[in-house]
Image: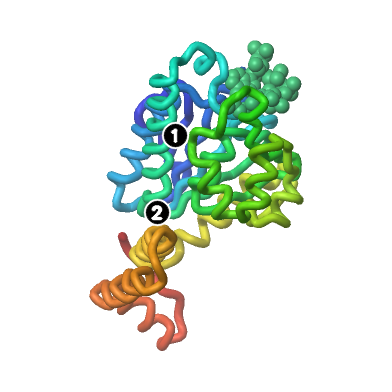
Amino acid sequence: MNTQSYKSLDFELIEQGTYLLTLNRPASLNALNTEIFREFALALDEVADDAEARVLLITGAGEKAFVAGADISEMRDKSAVEGMAFSQTAMTLFRRLEMLPIPVIAVVNGYCLGGGCELAMACDWIIASENAVFGQPEVNLGITPGFGATQRLSRLIGPARAMEMIVSGRHVDANEALTWGLVNHVYPQDRLMDEALSIAGTICQKGPLAVRLSKQAIVRGASLDLDSGCQIESQAFGLCFSSAEQKEGMAAFLEKRKPEFKGA
Ligand code: COA
């Protein structure tokens, strides 16, 4: 089913509970510009409004790139104030993505550079094709990263590796990204989307409230001290016991049958 019409991205409910957002500007290797950000925000509104949504997959159109960065032709003539505003737009959007109540998987099918890598890191995890290439090449253009890499890349792979990638601008291939913990799994390109759908299918079979609360505890806990994070987990755990899915999940286990979870 197609949702509202978009120009720079495709956004559809591809299976019950699973949305697929495809960044679709292949002529510029899906570079991120103002229009794509505007449409991305609308797509996130649609997902957030759908109580039946379970998983969001994000990928790039074509076989060459996930996203090759922010759009350099749009950025070239920006002033300092406009540069900061462009950064703030992306920061707000990527934080919203990170805080989306359902899991979001970046399905990285090629170049994943600059803003593309920053977008992928704002997803809950990354799976990649064997030809994927990661990098933060902003220093080649005389700028710093602007959509979160100095913070999220450090937290994901550690400050030394993040420093190396950001200050040298060097590309990292899929297997190195896997070793460094930037990527969860690497697949041949022709299997990547099937693997993504299989992961989505697995998540859709689980208790929807438990999935949402688990994500919330992990994301919110990441910026808290241990005691505060554990407190969020205790509250989430307690809340589960007021849900029909907890009754069904435990009854099904004890009756040796598969649970039938309904709704979120
Ligand atoms: N912004 C705008 N356009 C971009 C772009 C970007 N970030 N990345 C690629 N493109 C465009 C190219 O200008 C080219 O357009 P053209 O066909 O009109 O000339 C088209 O996409 C294809 O890119 P091209 O460079 O010809 O492909 P390639 O296979 O030789 O190289 C890359 C691929 C990804 C290595 C190279 O495009 C690149 O380095 N892109 C910029 C990456 C970057 O610096 N990102 C951070 C931005 S802050």
* Element type at mark 2: loop
Between 160 and 256, the one lying in front of the other is 160
Percent coordinates x, y for residue 63 in the rendering: 68, 31
Between 21 and 30, the one lying in front of the other is 30
Asked which quadrant contains residue 71, the reply is top right
Q: Are there few (<14), some (14-19), or many (20+) residues within 10 Å of tag 1?
A: many
| Depicted 179 relative to depicted 85: above or below | below
Amino acid identity at mark 2: Ile
Percent coordinates x, y for residue 60 in the rendering: 58, 33
- Residue 28 in sight in this render: no
Residue at x-position 32% and y-position 73%: 231
60 left or right of 93?
right
Quarter of the image for the N terminus: give it: top left
Residue denoted by label 1:
11
Amino acid identity at mark 1: Phe
Asked which quadrant contains residue 166, the reply is top right
Residue denoted by label 2:
102
Please tell me which of labels 1 and 2 falls first in the chain: 1
Percent coordinates x, y for residue 236 in the rendering: 31, 71
Residue extending furthest toward the left: 242
* Element type at mark 1: strand
Percent coordinates x, y for residue 214 in the rendering: 40, 65
Residue at x-position 30% and y-position 47%: 50
Q: Are there few (<14), some (14-19), or many (20+) residues within 10 Å of tag 2?
A: many
Quarter of the image for the C terminus: give it: bottom left
| Depicted 111 relative to depicted 217: above or below | above
